[in-house]
Image (spheres, rainbow, N blue to C red):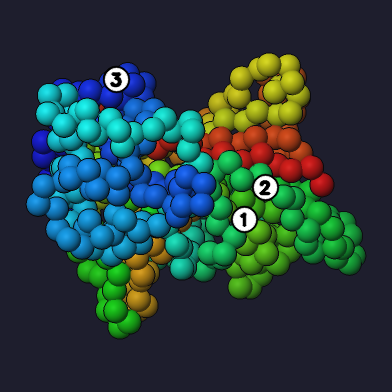
Amino acid sequence: MYQLNETHARDLLSWVESANDIACDFPIQNLPFGVCEGASGEASRVVVAIGDQVLDIAQALKAGLFEGLAVETAQACRSTRLNDLMALGPAHQSALRLQLSRLLREGTQHSATVKRCLSPTAQKHMLLPAHIGDFSDFFTSIHHATNSGRLARPDNPLMPNFKHIPVAYHSRASSIVVSGTPCPRPMGQTKPTGASTPVFGPTRSLDFECEIGLYVGKGTKLGESIPLDKTHEHIFGLSLLNDWSARDMQSWESQPLGPFLAKSFMTSMSPWIITLEALAPFRMPAATRGVDDPELLPYLNEPSDRAHGGLALNLEISLQSQAMKRQGSTPCVISRPKFQDQYWTLFQMLAHQTSNGCNMLPGDLIGSGTVSGPREGELGCLKEMTADGKIGITLPNGETRTYLEAGDEVVFRGRCEREGYASIGFGQCSGIVMAE
Ligand code: CA
């Protein structure tokens, strides 16, 4: 686990004034990495968010602002994606973060030079921050598993393996897109209730799933497993993830091999990666296991994971219909799940995924699965909120929704909050459902 250091100090302020606003997602304690489009004709750039600005790291390197930064770190920052920086591992990433913090904090001698490397985020087109070679999606919320299981098996909602193994499936990397990309309504085969034969057509139950995405940092060799207490050395950081889902296609195709086309049509990612080091102040005990829960197998059980494997991260899902937009109504928050309620930790997910010796590459993506909490107002997808389309939710203008309709915009936000520390945010992951 990362130790707290001077970059986490609560009273640290930046000379970039927008970063000192208490509601800002990107104060100086955050320093998330992203990639934006270059100026016309130029390659994409590795950038860091500070307040409402982005810092172009390669430009800052050219201006001679980094002292004693390792050659390979500097080289990685001149790349067009974050994979090279991810591959270097925590010591390099931490050294870079320290220098960025010192350059951007109040009192630095270099602010005039750094200022020339800043530009407003609003003027930048953010891209997917890494080349994602592989994507697997877990199923780690016991509340989501129970709620969705109950719809199919009212008497026995939770599968017998859930408390033994972090369940996952391999998803599709080619259709991962950056926040803001519109979501097309997928076509597919479904078997409507009461019909004797299946039909092919656009999904009638388009849903979102509010998840956290984990980017792998330093990779592993084929045959190598990551012990649970070393997983933190292989995690670069986290982003918000929307696993768009077609429920009618999913329920028909998923037996016996799991989801396929119901999920692979698109997955959205927020553009900023919040590093594991930035998240250090918000680590907390893993969710408590029930007294009757089975004992964890040794490869999934480690004292520091029980003590620090959780994360105080509050999520927020909002929805704005086309009519609401036309009427000038702001998006309405429909749920506030908490990541701390996840049954399995991020670290257990990575230890499990590599337990068979499957190698991981820098930039590989692991989804947490839908984040749903035990309380009302904490559900992470419409399937749970509407009992699979049976009970509509009402929007502030009187419209109702079971599943998503054309023009609906879904926005996820995330914020880490803890007494005694500066809050940091994840930015947003959004997408509008396209007309058919
Ligand atoms: Ca999912």
Q: Amino acid at mark 3?
A: Glu
Looking at the picture, which amino acid does disc 1 mark?
Met
Q: Is residue 157 above or below residue 390?
A: below
Q: Nearer the viewer, residue 108 or 253?
A: 108
Relative to 374, say whether 149 is above or below. Answer: below
Closest to the observer, 141 or 151 = 141
Q: Between tags 3 and 2, which lies in front?
A: 3
User: Farthest residue in the right direction?
Assistant: 196
Can residue 308 be seen by looking at this rendering? no
Q: Is residue 241 left or right of residue 197?
A: left
Report the Cα–Cα distance between label 1 and label 3. 37 Å
Percent across and percent down for residue 336 are: 48, 31
Numbered label attached to residue 183: 2
Residue 168 position in % (x across, y down): 48, 64
Q: Secondary structure at mark 3?
A: helix
Q: Which residue is mark 3?
A: 17
Residue at 20% over, 28% down: 111
Numbered badge on residue 1: none
Which residue is rendered at x = 89% and y = 67% of the image? 197
Give the residue at mark 1. 266
Q: Measuring 22% from the left and 69% from the top, which residue is drawn there?
A: 227
Kind of element beneath mark 2:
loop
Name the residue located 75 percent from the left edge and 38 percent from the top edge. 405
What kind of residue is marked 2? Cys
Q: Position of residue 356 (x, y in %)?
A: 35, 79
- Name the image quarter holding residue 92: bottom left
Q: Is residue 101 visible?
A: yes
